[in-house]
Image (cartoon, rainbow, N blue to C red):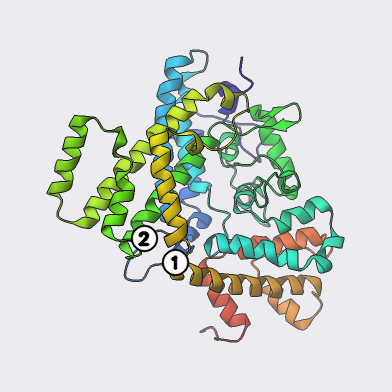
Amino acid sequence: MVIMEWSKLISIQRLGKATVSTSNTDIRSAFQRDYDRLIFSSAFRRLQNKTQVFPLPGSVFVHNRLTHSLEVASVGRSLANLLVDHILKTDNSTDRTLIEQIPTIVSTACLAHDLGNPPFGHSGEATISEFFIDKESVFKDKMTNTQWADLINFDGNANAFRLLTHTYNGKREGGFGLTFSTLASVVKYPYKAIDSPKRNKFGYFNQDFEAYKNISENLGLKSKDKNMRHPLVYLVEAADDICYQIMDIEDAYKLHILSFQEAFTLLSGFSYFMSADQQENFQKTIDNLNDNNEKIAYLRALSINALVNECIKTFIINETEIMNGLYTGSLLKRISSEASKAMKAIQKISIERIYNHSTVIEIEISGHRIIHSLMEDFTAAVLRPEKFSSEKILNLMPQQYRVSKESSMYDKLLSVVDYISSMTDIYALELYRTIRGISIPKI
């Protein structure tokens, strides 16, 4: 007997709507509508100008947050298709049409997983957290410990849930109005910052707790005093981990950070799964390719395919633990020893050669300076709104992010975080230059 049941976990109930209406004339399922809402949203489009790892492209086009999210959605769908095959063979109690919606739910959650990330990658997250840590004497005594924990542990995961669910000024109730299942599949860490076992790893801000509580209770994600992950979160997390670690190797090769032989050797580590015949076909394909870029792309595809199969095997082996909310860690942490060895080799060289490469460090330093400066200007304006300069600064904020003068300090600071985290790298840079008088906007 498992605690979580697919019949409850897959729900078309939407946030912001008390009742759900369905029509026989609808050509899209509720979950397909979720997918379309994200694809056509301005928040999703903005990802094209947000850093993934390397600076935004010059002569070589590397991944940004948008292309990364699209690839994660593709891998997530593959994982979900394999899970559907397994469930349909082993579970006769759940409506087949519900189970068949899982790939759409997972791919949609994959599209949404990075929406809350601020400009300049993980450096942006760290900068916002450190800003508030440094300002403890200014802000902390004006809010509760739970509220303060949200700010000093700012996390893009929690911010994604907020972006999807919060009712901003002039916007629809319930944010994007997505289904409970899609929203729950985005929440990797189902607890508040103050309850987090790891710094900067939590699922929702205190202001958004009621939204998450409503979702988790509806889907059966609470056991006694414990909040459980939605099982599909493991697929979203695995798709993200697979894509960024494998694709970073390809990007590093294209940018000449890694040589062809280094990238080839790392990605060839996943050829362990091939039979003798497959190995022979693999070698023939490699020999017939004259373009080294194509060879790396071919190996990348094989590597992703191997890891998809490894992760779904891990899910199936640990299915009872997962469905009872007892599984800890990610799927990639428990893959076979051969695959794990190949992944560790990639992780080691990524840390040594990629994430500490000068171009990555330079964008992190620049991003830190830009975001810290913007945080300084806008929070100072929130503290002293009556000043002439503060009034002008706050007027730059779009209406959807503004709060009243009577709002709590927590709400005011969150409004600043909402605005700055929504920016693209390019917009943040332009606004920084304008406010600092480095450049004057053209009329």
Mark count:
2
Q: Identify the residue position indicated by label 1 in the image.
A: 357
Point out the tag, 1 or 2, that comes first from the N-terminus: 2
Q: Which residue is mark 2?
A: 252
Q: Are marks 1 and 2 in contact (CB under 8 Å)?
A: yes
* Residue in view at x 64 percent, y 46 percent: 165
Q: Residue at x 52, y 17 (%)?
A: 94
x 54%, y 53%: residue? 115
Residue 179 pos. (x, y %): 58, 37
Looking at the image, residue 253 sits to the left or right of residue 370; the answer is left
The N terminus - image quarter: top right
Q: Nearer the viewer, residue 98 or 294?
A: 294
Q: Secondary structure at mark 1?
A: loop
Element carrying mark 2: helix
Q: Nearer the viewer, residue 351 or 90?
A: 351
Q: Amino acid at mark 1?
A: His
Q: Is residue 266 visible?
A: yes
In terms of depth relative to the viewer, which is nearer, 336 or 378? Answer: 336
**Can I make out residue 32 in this image?**
no
User: Could you classify mark 1 by the number of other residues whose Cα lies within 10 Å: few (under 14), some (14-19), or many (20 or more)?
Assistant: some
Q: Position of residue 185 (x, y in %)?
A: 56, 38
- Horizontal side of residue 196 vs 305, given as left or right: right
Question: Quick one: label 2, few (<14), some, or many (20+) residues within 10 Å?
Answer: many
x and y percentages locating residue 359 in the rendered image: 44, 70
Q: Looking at the rendering, which quadrant does residue 20 occupy?
A: top right
Between residues 293 and 3, which one lies in front from this camera angle?
Answer: 293
Residue 63 has which mark? none
Q: CA distance from mark 1 to mark 2?
A: 10 Å
Q: Is residue 171 left or right of residue 73?
A: right
Q: Amino acid at mark 2?
A: Ala
Report x, y in % for residue 317.
48, 24
